[in-house]
Amino acid sequence: MKARLVKFGEIEVEGKRYTHDVVIEGGKVRKRKKGPSKQFREKFGHTPLSAEEEIPWRGKRLIVGTGAQGALPVMDEVLAEAKRRGIELIAAPTSEVCQLLEEVKKGQAYAILHCTC
């Protein structure tokens, strides 16, 4: 699956550009709804990825792009839930995980890509 961080605040997935965080679930792209995680913002100084969000848990591997500089916090509860489900969770700066997505077939991609910080 083709994805790339175009610039700070803009990401491209399969040729379509987005100016917001995205969730890829089985190859389908949707906007990340981070509202449920905003309650943790003060603790982290940034809205983290929390288990309160709609996370695409159906695959064997979840790829999390943590932003241009890798600053998106991934809460321990997300890591624990991935382990409980037997899902490999990879979290790294968005530009790096976009390269990993190149190896994944479109219908088998499960990812959350943050396009700022």
Image (tube, grey):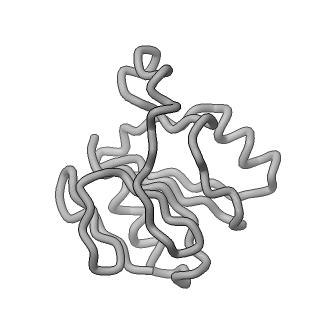
Residue at figure coordinates x 65%, y 64% from the top left = 61
Residue at figure coordinates x 33%, y 61% from the top left = 95
Reply above or below: 87 against 101: above
The percent coordinates of residue 7 (x first, y second) are: 17, 58
Number of residue marks? 0
User: Seen in the image, is 100 located left or right of residue 60?
Assistant: left
The percent coordinates of residue 28 (x first, y second) are: 50, 72
In front of the other: 47 or 63: 47
Considering every residue shown, the one lying at the far top of the view is 42
Considering every residue shown, the one lying at the far left of the view is 7
Residue at figure coordinates x 72%, y 66% from the top left = 60
Reply above or below: 22 against 4: above
Considering every residue shown, the one lying at the far bottom of the view is 105
Quadrant location of the N terminus in the rendered image: bottom left
The percent coordinates of residue 91 (x first, y second) are: 51, 51
Quadrant location of the C terminus in the rendered image: top left
Q: Determine which quarter of the picture holds residue 69.
A: top left
The percent coordinates of residue 5 (x first, y second) are: 27, 63
Residue at figure coordinates x 52%, y 61% from the top left = 111
